[in-house]
Amino acid sequence: MIDFKIHDSVLDLPDTWNTLVTQDIFLQTPFLNALEVSCPKNIKTHYISIFDNQKQVGLAVVQRVKIYIDDVFRNPTDNALKRFIKTVIAQVVKGNALIVGNLMHTGQHGLFFDQNYISQTNFLTTVFNAINTLALTIKKEEGKTIRIIGFKDYFKTDSIHLNTSLFTKNQLYKVQVQPSMVLSLKQEWSSIDDYVISLKKKYRSRYRTALKKANTIVKKELDLDAIVSESEQLFTLYKYVSDNAKVNSFVLDHQHFFNLKQHLDQDFKVFGYYLDGKLIGFYTLIINNSDLETYFLGYNSKYQHKHQLYLNMLYDMLAFGIDNNLKQVVYARTALEIKSSVGAKPEVMYIYMKHTNTVFINPVLRYIVKTLNPVKKWEQRHPFK
C-alpha cells in the first residue's frame, strides 16, 4: 500500500531519505539543514516521504511561501504607472503558496522517486494527496488558505510532462518560463586557456579585455571565518543585485551563506572580488556531483562597468568547472544574452501552477505568470569556432 508522511523538520526525516536520492545535493539533508536554519522569513519548508509497504520509494520538498507585495516588486526604478500595474497583479498572487521545489534556485529540485518500486503516475498522485493534506492542515491550524500551488522548473525533456493529464485534472496550468542557461564543458578543455582557444576571434578579444579591466581586482576564496567577517558586506552586495531584479519572492537571511558553508563545506564556494582591500563583489557556487551550479552573487554598481565584474565572474565560474573536471556549468536564469556570449545555451523550462480560486482567478493565472515572468526575445550568441 502506498502512503505518505509529512515532516516539518529535517530532523524528522527517515534514515532512508539520503540513501534514496544520491545525485542531487539540493535534496540531501546537509543542504536542507542549511536552508532550514537560514530560510527567508516568508518561506517554510515541508518534506514529504512516500512509502510502499513501509519502504521509502519517493520524496518531495515543498516550500510554503508567504508572498508579500514589497518582496515581489523591489525595483526602485519602476515608474508610478508600472508599479501600480504590478501592485494590481500582486494582489492576485499574494498570500500563501505551496511550491514543489526550491524557490531560491533554478531547476527541478523538489521531486524524486525510485521507478523500480513506484510509477511516476502513482508517485505524483500521492504528492498531490500530500499537498492537499498539507493545505488542509495549514487551514485548520493557522486559519490560512493556500492560494497558489506550483511545481517548478522542468526541462522540456523531463518525464513529468508525460503526466500532463494529471496536472490538468488537478487544474494546474503548464507555463513556459525563462530558460536555464547551461554551458557544457568539453573534455578537451584542461584549462581556461583551452577554452579561450576554442573561441572565435571576437570573443577571445572580449575575454582578454574583461581580464584586463579586472587586473587590479584581487580574487580569493572566502573560508568560514572570512564569510563571518564579511557577512554584512556580502548581504549588502547581494541585496543590491536582488533589489534590481524585476520579480522576487523572498529576501535571503543574513546568515544564509554562512550556514551553507557550515553544512556543505567544500561543496559550497564563496569567491570575493577585492579592490584596495574592500570587498566589491562576490559569487557563490555549489558542486552538485558532476555539475557546477551557480548560486547567488552580488557587486557594487560603482565598479561593475569599469571592471566588468559580472562578465569576469562568468569566466571565473567556468574556469572553476574546468579545473575541477566538472561536466557543465548551470548558469541558471537572468542575463541570458551575456551568458550565451560565454558559451551557455538555453534549456527551455516549464512550471505547473494553479490558483485555488478556480472559478475567477485560476483561468487567468497563466497570463499573470507570463506578465510577471515573460519569455523574452533575446539574441543568442555563438562564441565558439
Image (cartoon, grey):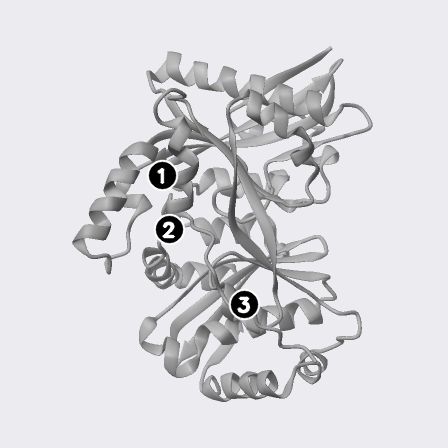
Identify the residue at horizontal 54%, vertical 21% (top origin). 170
Camera sees residue 222: no
Identify the residue at horizontal 54%, vertical 49% (top origin). 106
Quarter of the image for the N terminus: give it: top right
Q: Is residue 189 above or below residue 329?
A: below
Image spot of residue 93 (x, y percent): 34, 34
Element carrying mark 2: loop
Question: Spatial distance from mark 1 to mark 3, Cα to Cα?
Answer: 31 Å
Q: Which mark is residue 220?
A: none
Compare marks 3 and 2 and give the one earlier in the sequence. Answer: 2
Residue neighbourhood size for the residue with mark 1, other residues' Cα within 10 Å, grouped as few (<14), some (14–19), many (≥20): few
Residue 217 location, quadrant: bottom left
Q: Which amino acid, by three-letter code, is at mark 2?
A: His
CB-based contact (under 8 Å), mark 3 and mark 2: no
Question: Spatial distance from mark 3 to mark 2, Cα to Cα?
Answer: 28 Å
Element carrying mark 3: helix
Quarter of the image for the C terminus: give it: bottom right
Question: Spatial distance from mark 1 to mark 2, Cα to Cα?
Answer: 11 Å
Image spot of residue 298 (x, y percent): 41, 64
For label 3, the residue is 339
Q: Which amino acid, by three-letter code, is at mark 1?
A: Lys
Camera sees residue 105: yes
Q: Which mark is residue 41?
A: 1
Q: Which sits in the foreground, 143 or 260?
A: 143
Compare marks 1 and 3 and give the one earlier in the sequence. Answer: 1
Image spot of residue 141 (x, y percent): 38, 14
Q: Closer to us: mark 1 or mark 2?
A: 1
Residue 137 location, quadrant: top left
Q: Is residue 2 above or below residue 338?
A: above
Q: Which amino acid, by three-letter code, is at mark 3?
A: Lys
For label 2, the residue is 254
Compare marks 1 and 2 and give the one earlier in the sequence. Answer: 1
